[in-house]
Amino acid sequence: MKCIHIITPVKDSIELTLQTVEAVLNSEITVPFRYTIYNDFSTDENTKRLEEASRKMGFELVNLSEFTSHPSPNYLLTLQMAQEKAVAAEAGLLIVESDVIVKKHTLQALFDGAQFRKECGIAAAVTVDEKEEVNYPYLYVKGKELNMVLPVKKHLSFCCSLLTTSFLRAFDFHSLNPEKNWFDVTISHQSLKKGFVNYLFTNLTVWHRPHGSRPWKLLKYSNSLKYYWLKLAKGIDKI
């Protein structure tokens, strides 16, 4: 990897998003990088706020409404566009979701850790709450010894994950199922199928406010029956 392309997919939830952006741009990072926000049909008002923030803060902004009329979520299109750009630049693709706050050293350390492990397909930072307790989606490592780098067979979330250039070259995101909404699971499994190793860096923690950008998904915990009814009735949140 000669550099990294950092992306954050966004739909509204602008206050949380700008906190994410600020943390990324304040990172202590030496590897060359470019940072792009993919705006997935935020409201006109929030799109204007993103455009203003882009000019002031210096990140690139891609308004997906200029490329598709497909309603949000357009995670597949985001991943496909980002993959093409990353492969062309011999870059790793580092996804930081809009409900995540990275520490100053997180991104450089994740890059260094992946670069050191030549067989690495995906490298992810573990998510924690404001008290540094492991939280969703990495509850499966809670209680285990942390401060380690763990090869994992379970899927990695894209809360804060780096996809290496080698893996991006090996698996074309245009082959992903367009009927689905989210692709963390599928892409994680494809990395393993292609012979790569996926690593969870429990020594790198990021503050995750689960589903902060899509509050309705919190129903999964507070009213699971309503969540699954919405999921099935509206055909949304397909993994």
Image: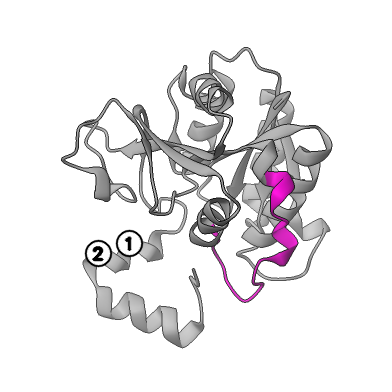
Q: Are marks 2 and 1 in contact (CB under 8 Å)?
A: yes
Residue 56 appears in the picture as rendered: yes
Q: Residue at x 58, y 72 (%)?
A: 180
Q: Secondary structure at mark 2?
A: helix
Of the 4 image quadrants, the one containing the N terminus is: top right
Res 48 → quadrant: top right
Whole-percent x, y for residue 220 in the image: 30, 67
Q: For the residues marked 2 and 1, what is the alpha-carbon distance in whole angstroms?
A: 6 Å
Whole-percent x, y for residue 74 in the image: 65, 62
174 magenta-colored: yes
Give neighbour class at mark 1: few <14, some 14-19, many 20+ (Cα, 10 Å).
some
Whole-percent x, y for residue 111 in the image: 56, 25
Decide if residue 167 is on the left or right side of residue 169.
left
Q: Amino acid at mark 2?
A: Tyr
Q: Amino acid at mark 1?
A: Leu
Which residue is disc 1 drawn over?
218
Q: Main secondary structure of the magenta part?
A: loop
Whole-percent x, y for residue 63 in the image: 75, 51
Q: Secondary structure at mark 1?
A: helix
In this picture, is 171 found above or below 220? above
Q: Which residues are magenta?
A: 168-183
Which residue is disc 2 drawn over?
221
Decide if residue 98 is on the left or right side of residue 166.
left
Q: Residue at x 79, y 47 (%)?
A: 84
Q: Residue furthest left?
A: 143
Q: Residue at x 45, y 58 (%)?
A: 214
Q: Residue at x 56, y 68 (%)?
A: 181
